[in-house]
Structure formats: structure tokens, C-alpha cells
């Protein structure tokens, strides 16, 4: 395990062939500036269209062997549905950063993912997965323990996980490896708010 600057521990666990990874809150600022003028809106729409065209051209020949360096897509808009946004953000990294096909939202795995997040909040990252408290739990798990908001998880924690790539050493690149693994076809995002300033989220891959 590794200790982050803010004292939160980054946990890397290997249990019975399953891959379990926890990502601590970072120091990034999730605030953003915006311009609501009409001209800006028109320009943004044009820029988004150009970006989509660039991505389509980049991905014309299929998945890339490695992610695009320093890839940091603009976070997906908040839809009000955390689990949908979590899946969309993971798929955003997969497509925009490495031309990988999207993962399906694994709705049948979400109840267990929620149980994992709540269970872990009073124990440690991946405790619920390790203790096999529910099913279906998937084959791999990433975790954002004790983050300050749902938006910070979607915008920042998942970015930190993706930024571990590329690489094959699981101790150093495990979050990225789980997010980009071609053997997984779906992901369930779970969440639990402790009510005391900490939100826990797991992402179970199947």
C-alpha cells in the first residue's frame, strides 16, 4: 500500500485472483469557471463537434495499444444519476483516450456495489469484496474511499485512476488496468454517503 500526501492510504489488494484497488481523495480542485454568454455557447458547440470528429478519426482503426498521453476529457455533465454518470465517465476515458468500446452499465450488480461501499466505509477499502458479503460482485474492483462529493468521484477520482496508465505492473497501474481491461464487458458503480463528510464509491467490473 502507498500513503498519499493527505494521509489517506492507497490500498492495493490481491484476493483469490480478483483485483481490488482503492483510490484516495487527491488534492485537485473540482471547481470550474464558465461563461454563459451566447457567443461562448456557440463556440463551445463548434469545439465539441470538432473534438468528436478528431476522436472518430483517431479511432478509425480500432483500439489503441496505449492510451493517449495526458488525456483528460472534460467531465461528463451531471445528469443527476451518479451511477449513470460514473459509467459514462469510465466509458469516456475508454473511448476518448484509447478508442476502447464502452462497458455496459451493470444494473444487476449495483445493489451489491452499494453494499460494498457501505460495508467498507466502517472497515477498509475492498472489505466487502474480500468478505464476499453479496453477489454478483464481479471479477475486479476499484474504489474511491471517503471522497467529498459525488462530482469529485466522477471528475477527479476516476481521472486519477486512469492516469496510472499505461503499464503492466499491477501495483503501479492497477486502476487503469481494470478500467481498460478488454476482458470486462460491464461495470456497476456503487455509492454510500456516510453523512459525516465522506462518500465511498466502488466500481465492480465483470
Image (tube, helix red, strand yellow):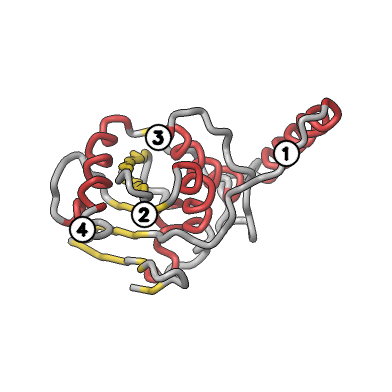
4 sits to left or right of 109: right
Which element is circle 2 on?
strand
Tell me the quadrant of the picture where the N terminus can be found.
bottom left
Label 1, label 4: how many angstroms apart (C-alpha)?
39 Å
Tell me the quadrant of the picture where the C terminus can be found.
top left
Label 4, label 3: how many angstroms apart (C-alpha)?
23 Å
The residue singled out by tag 4 in the image is: 123
Which of the two marks, 4 or 3, is nearer to us in this view? 4
Q: Are marks 1 and 2 in contact (CB under 8 Å)?
A: no
Q: Residues within 10 Å of mark 4 (few under 14, many from 20)?
A: few
The residue singled out by tag 1 in the image is: 34
Q: Which mark is residue 147?
A: none
Label 1, label 2: how many angstroms apart (C-alpha)?
28 Å
In which quarter of the view is residue 118 placed? top left
* Location of residue 140 in the rendering, given as x and y in whole percent from the top left corner: 30, 52
* Location of residue 74 in the rendering, given as x and y in whole percent from the top left corner: 64, 43
Q: Residues within 10 Å of mark 3 (few under 14, many from 20)?
A: many
Which of the two marks, 3 or 1, is nearer to us in this view? 1
Label 2, label 3: how many angstroms apart (C-alpha)?
17 Å
Q: Are marks 4 and 3 in contact (CB under 8 Å)?
A: no
The residue singled out by tag 3 in the image is: 83
Q: Earlier in the sequence, mark 4 or mark 2?
A: 4
In which quarter of the view is residue 21 placed? bottom left
Label 4, label 2: how many angstroms apart (C-alpha)?
12 Å
Q: Residues within 10 Å of mark 1 (few under 14, many from 20)?
A: few
The residue singled out by tag 2 in the image is: 146
Question: Please, which residue is most extreme toward the front here?
Answer: 196
Q: Earlier in the sequence, mark 3 or mark 1?
A: 1
Front residue of 168 and 30: 30
Amino acid at each position: 500500500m502507498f500513503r498519499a500526501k493527505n494521509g489517506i492510504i492507497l490500498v492495493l489488494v490481491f484476493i483469490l485472483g480478483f483485483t481490488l484497488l482503492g483510490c484516495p481523495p487527491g488534492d485537485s480542485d473540482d471547481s470550474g469557471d464558465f461563461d454563459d454568454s451566447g457567443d461562448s455557447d456557440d463556440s463551445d458547440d463548434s469545439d465539441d463537434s470538432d473534438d468528436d470528429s478528431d476522436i472518430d478519426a483517431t479511432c478509425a482503426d480500432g483500439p489503441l495499444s496505449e492510451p493517449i498521453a495526458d488525456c483528460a476529457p472534460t467531465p461528463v455533465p451531471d445528469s443527476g444519476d451518479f451511477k449513470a454518470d460514473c459509467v459514462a465517465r469510465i466509458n469516456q476515458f475508454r473511448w476518448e483516450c484509447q478508442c476502447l468500446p464502452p462497458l455496459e452499465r451493470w444494473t444487476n450488480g449495483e445493489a451489491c456495489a452499494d453494499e460494498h461501499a457501505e460495508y467498507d466505509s466502517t472497515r477498509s477499502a475492498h472489505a466487502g469484496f474480500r468478505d464476499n458479503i453479496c453477489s454478483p460482485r464481479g471479477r475486479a474492483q476499484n474504489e474511491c474511499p471517503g471522497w467529498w462529493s459525488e462530482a469529485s468521484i466522477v471528475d477527479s477520482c476516476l481521472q486519477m485512476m486512469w492516469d496510472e496508465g499505461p503499464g503492466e505492473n499491477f501495483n503501479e497501474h492497477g486502476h487503469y488496468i481494470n478500467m481498460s481491461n478488454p476482458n470486462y464487458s460491464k461495470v456497476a458503480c456503487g455509492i454510500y454517503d456516510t453523512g459525516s463528510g465522506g462518500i465511498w464509491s466502488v466500481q465492480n467490473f465483470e
